[in-house]
Image: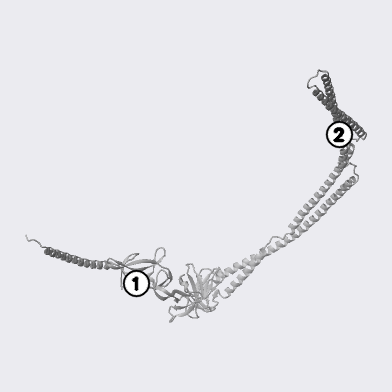
């Protein structure tokens, strides 16, 4: 076996590496080819979109509406209601001149109506005569009732005044007796005098009791002092006996001391005895003085007050006074009762008189009869006028017959029989616009009006402007004379240039979801495995202005460089990958 050298081993390694490099290169080429094919297949299936950046432009608004020519004014042809129509001489749309016969009334039926009205007139005239006669009788009865009520009032006034005069006389007599009794009062000691006398009497008794009490107290004091004096004398005798006993006894050590103590005690008791004797003397002197005062007090005796007889006389006088006052009170009540009775009687009689004088209830029967008679006379006058014209109802002015509201053989009503246009008033053009269109067409604005059959449009003005039931507006413009006939249709056109908008896009690029939120789709570019890719982003925007072609966006959400998707070949949503067409 041939031995491999180091050089051969290295050469073999290099050859093996070259093979691997070539294989890897082939692999990369295959992967690149597959990537190109995959990207082509992927891109071919993506929705194609076109984009546009917002531009500056004016938003122009065009208002278009269809309408019709209507009459400028109508006249109603009226006649009396209830008349039978025998013939109609015109048709709707006919042009008639003044005094042209429009329809004819049945003369036989008209004669029957006139006869009926004349009979009704005779009946009302008889009823008016009867009512006026009855009203005259009622007026006479009212005058009599007023006279009788006045007489009753005067009689009640006299009778009640007499009763009051008598009550006044009785009150005056009772008051006189009371005044005479009061002028002769019974003497009576006043309460203050009685209180003073009783106070004097009680003071006198109190003074006697006070002196007696003082004498009794002093006597008790004297008894106590005499008892003390007797006890003191006994003690003195005992001390003297004790001293004699000590003096007669044998000598001992404390004998002199005991004798001195006995002498001292006898001296003290003697002094006490002298004091008690002095007090007893002063007390006896005080008792003698109090006895003198008591004797003097009893000599000035004050008698106990006694008002019994005075009270009996005064009570009798008071009873008489009370009786007289009761009589005055009763007389005064009788006077008040008489005054009340007078007021009540006169009030009732005054009411009776007022009731008699009250204006009679309004009776408009005569006036109503007169009004009905006047109306019948007016109707008869008009009926005779129709009869004198052989039943013909004629036009009062020139114009077109716009509507016939009666039929042959039928009867006329209280509304218009025929509507006749007024030829003297120019026709009008009427049309309606939506609420949104109302932003660009206002009162007194001018616009272009193209009438069917006209060679060229005319300029018209919004003369009348009102809101209708649908939320839009009804507009009427006056037309020049002889412009068009009633019923002609036409079209109104008005173009209004808005403000210059910085961000405008095609109106089809703006979308609205179920919540009425407006948004647009914008194109965003990003890098992926297969290169640059485009994705869709949904962006909420606010519409400043809009027409059928363009929409103006508010600034902020988008800018002048934003790629707005204006069209696409397949359905797209947020995040959809798309292919941008150049």
User: Disc 2 to disc 1, how far (Cα)?
Assistant: 141 Å
x then y, percent, for residue 252: 79, 20
- Circle nearer the N terminus (2, 1): 1
Q: Which residue is outermost to the left? A: 1
Do the numbered discs 2 and 1 sit on residues whose CB atoms are within 8 Å? no
> Which one is in front, 98 or 125?
98
Q: Which of labels 2 and 1 is toward the front? A: 2
The N terminus appears in which quarter of the rendering?
A: bottom left
> Which one is in front, 92 or 377?
92
> Which one is in front, 290 or 515?
290
x then y, percent, for residue 52: 35, 73
The C terminus appears in which quarter of the rendering?
A: bottom left
- The circle on residue 210 is 2
Position of residue 572 in the picture relative to residue 305 (left or right): left
Is there any visible trace of residue 224 in the rendered image? no
Q: How crowded is mark 2: few (under 14 residues within 10 Å), some or many (20 or more)?
A: few
Is there any visible trace of residue 45 in the rendered image? yes
Determine the secondary structure under disc 1: strand
> Which one is in front, 228 or 533?
228
* Total numbered labels: 2
Determine the secondary structure under disc 2: helix
Q: Residues within 10 Å of mark 1 (few under 14, many from 20)?
A: some
User: Please, which colouring scheme is shown?
Assistant: one colour
Question: In which quadrant of the rendered view does residue 509 lie?
Answer: bottom left
């Amino acid at each position: 076996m041939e031995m491999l050298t180091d050089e051969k081993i290295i050469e073999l390694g290099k050859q093996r590496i070259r093979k691997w490099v070539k294989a890897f290169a082939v692999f990369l080429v295959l992967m690149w080819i597959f990537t190109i094919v995959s990207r082509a297949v992927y891109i071919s299936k993506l929705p194609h979109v076109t984009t546009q950046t917002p531009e500056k432009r004016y938003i122009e608004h065009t208002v278009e509406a269809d309408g019709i020519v209507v009459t400028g004014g109508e006249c109603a042809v009226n006649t009396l209601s209830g008349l039978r129509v025998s013939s109609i001489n015109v048709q709707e749309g006919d042009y008639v001149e003044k005094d042209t016969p429009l329809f004819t009334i049945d003369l036989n039926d008209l004669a029957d109506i006139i006869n009926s009205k004349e009979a009704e007139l005779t009946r009302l005239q008889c009823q008016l005569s009867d009512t006026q006669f009855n009203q005259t009788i009622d007026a006479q009865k009212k005058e009599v009732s007023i006279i009788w009520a006045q007489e009753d009032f005067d009689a009640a006034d006299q009778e009640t005044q007499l009763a009051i005069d008598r009550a006044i006389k009785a009150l005056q007599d009772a008051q006189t007796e009371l005044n005479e009794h009061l002028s002769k009062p019974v003497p009576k000691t006043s309460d203050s005098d009685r209180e003073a006398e009783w106070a004097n009497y009680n003071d006198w008794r109190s003074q006697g009791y006070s002196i007696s009490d003082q004498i009794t107290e002093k006597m008790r004091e004297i008894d106590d002092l005499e008892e003390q004096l007797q006890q003191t004398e006994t003690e003195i005798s005992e001390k003297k006996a004790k001293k004699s006993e000590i003096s007669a006894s044998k000598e001992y050590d404390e004998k002199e001391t005991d004798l001195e103590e006995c002498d001292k005690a006898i001296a003290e008791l003697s002094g006490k005895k002298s004091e008690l004797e002095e007090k007893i003397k002063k007390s006896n002197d005080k008792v003698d003085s109090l006895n003198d005062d008591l004797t003097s007090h009893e000599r000035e005796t004050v008698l106990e007050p006694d008002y019994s007889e005075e009270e009996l006389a005064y009570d009798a006088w008071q009873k008489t006074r009370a009786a007289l006052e009761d009589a005055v009170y009763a007389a005064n009540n009788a006077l008040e009762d008489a005054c009340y009775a007078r007021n009540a009687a006169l009030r009732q009689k005054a009411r009776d008189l007022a009731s008699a004088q009250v204006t009679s209830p309004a009776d408009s029967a005569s006036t109503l009869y007169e009004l009905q008679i006047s109306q019948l006379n007016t109707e008869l006058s008009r009926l005779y006028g129709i009869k004198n014209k052989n039943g013909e109802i004629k036009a009062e002015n020139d114009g077109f017959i716009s509507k016939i509201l009666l039929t042959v053989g039928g009867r006329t009503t209280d509304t218009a029989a025929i509507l006749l246009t007024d030829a003297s008033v120019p026709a009008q053009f009427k049309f309606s616009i939506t609420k949104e269109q109302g932003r660009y067409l206002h009162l007194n604005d001018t616009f272009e009006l193209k009438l069917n059959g006209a060679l060229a449009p005319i300029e018209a003005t919004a003369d009348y402007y009102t809101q209708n039931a649908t939320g839009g507006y009804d507009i009427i413009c006056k037309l020049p004379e002889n412009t068009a006939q009633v019923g002609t249709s036409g079209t109104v056109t008005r173009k209004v240039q808005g403000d210059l908008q910085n961000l405008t896009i095609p109106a089809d690029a703006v979308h609205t979801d179920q919540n009425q939120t407006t948004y647009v789709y914008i194109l965003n570019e990003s890098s992926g495995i297969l290169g640059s890719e485009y994705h869709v982003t949904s962006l909420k925007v606010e519409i400043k202005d809009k027409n059928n072609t363009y929409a103006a966006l508010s600034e902020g959400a988008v800018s002048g460089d934003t790629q707005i998707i204006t069209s696409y070949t397949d359905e797209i949503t947020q995040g959809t990958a798309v292919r941008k067409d150049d």
